Amino acid sequence: MNNRRQISVFKIGGAILTGLLLTASFPDMGRSYIAWFALVPLMGAIREGSPLAAFRLGLLGGMVHYLSLIYWIIPCLRNYGMLPLYLSVAILLLFSAYLSLFIAGFAAILNWTCRSVKMLLFAAPVIWVACEYIRANLFTGFPWELFGYSQFRITPLIQFADILGVYGVSWLLVLGNCSILCLVLALRKSNWHKSPLTRNKVLTAWACFILVLASFWGYGVRRLETIEAQAAKAPLKRVAVIQGNIPQEKKWDTAFQLATVDRYLDMSRREAAADPELIVWPETAMPFYFGHNAPLTNRVFRGIAATGADYIVSSPSFIRQGDTVAYRNRAFMVSSREGRITGIYDKAHLVPFGEYVPLKAWLPFLGKLVAQVGDFTPGEQGIALEWENHRIGMLICYELIFPYLSRESTRNGANLLVSITNDAWYGKTSAPYQHFSMGVFRAVENRRTLARSANTGISGFIEPTGKISATTPIFEEAALTGTVPLMQISTLYTRFGDWFSLACVILSFAMMIFRIFRQKN
């Protein structure tokens, strides 16, 4: 009995440790090297026992991970959703439990289908990527901080994302974890299920991992040289991003409307000394209906004309459709020479319970739970704004975390990606750092510069190689101007999208079907 209790405690401890190590891999701790062994304790804990036991351990590890990763949901709901603490905590627990199901599913499927070391090395990375892809797309999808994002600062390693996307880096990380697990089990003279870890198996595992890692790294080094050379030959433009640092509690107060507009105009006027050709304001920087509120709209137009640069500005908007009104979260391209709006982009992927209430007709009470929930309708995906002889792909708020949106706008001719957001909701938590980190992969996947303007930060520039060239601190007024290349090349990822992760989903289901037939026979 004592021996069983010790084994149980060891397994529970392994699951909890994996949850903590996973979170430590992401900002703002950001210890990317931890990701290479973060899954080892959990996989060691599920190497024996039933798939159900593995599912429970995976669920526990996932809960620890997501509770410590997205804890910022509580202050967001408390401060701006006006929810009581107990309800905010309950929502965090429920959401974390949902996300944990995918780690639990990984653990259960791995335990059930992989009974040999060879199968472990092949299947574990495939199953993990399949679970990530399903999480990223099921219902409205929530691909926040997929495993591969932990490596966003390791520039040579992530260049393969222009073929496989962030899922390719996740695949490599899990393969690395499997290799370390094999070594640990061999040193402990333990088995994977009933498969012994011999010296030859460990050497084979490490040879495979080193070969794949070297291939990734070698491709990255060569690709960096190629992209930097192409960027040097591309047309260059001067772009400025403005970070107004408007407190969220004042943002929609009508008493501060004029002061907010004047702050952005004054900051833009000062930054005009750096000679930008395009100035970008954050998401809903204008706290009024641009184009409908005539006095404030004209004030903005006059300020834009005075600087001589073109602008991307943002505000809520609405469209009358018969007797109904459709509200949009909109970005405007404004020409200083023509003195008019030359293009619009309406946010296409809305935030559930933030910008709309899912299943509102059937669950009307949900809208009342969040005091400041919006009632927006989505726009068309992939719209690229015309700017001179170029095009700009817009990403509003957490559209940045969905690869298909930047891919679609790039396929529609975007030479530059612009992300605008208001991360004031998150406060001084790790969320702004996590949000910004995912933009690195959008730049690499499509080989486009990404310029980001955030109300309270982080604002900055990410090069087509994924290198972060400039950033601002959070919760400070700031402005940056950078010279950015407008690239034309089309990557394999831009053309074919998530073919790799879809293949992993198919392979995972094939392995489960094969396992069912083996059990029957």
Image: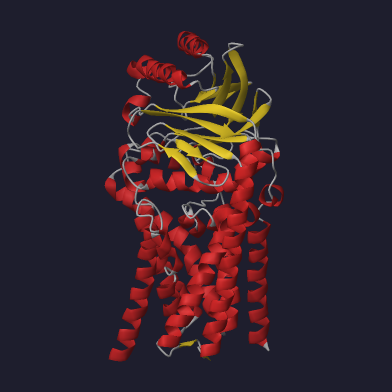
Q: Is residue 268 above or below residue 496?
A: above
Q: Is 358 in front, or is 255?
A: 255
Percent position of residue 19, x then y = 38, 65
Q: At 43% across and 79% down in the image, what residue appears?
A: 44
For the rendered model, the colour scheme is secondary structure
Q: Name the spot of residue 4 as percent of width and height, x first.
A: 33, 88
Q: Quadrant of residue 134?
A: bottom right
Q: Is any part of residue 381 visible from this angle?
A: no
Give left or right: position of 107 versus 94.
right
Can residue 297 be seen by looking at this rendering?
A: yes
Say if 58 sits above or below 476 in the image.
below
Above-or-below relation of 179 to 71:
below
Q: Is residue 221 above or below residue 88?
A: below
Return the x and y of residue 58 as percentages of the image width and height. Answer: 44, 70
Total count of labels:
0
Q: Residue at x 32, y 29 (%)?
A: 249
Quarter of the rendering containing residue 94: bottom left
Where does the image place residue 263, in percent across and percent down from the top left? 37, 19
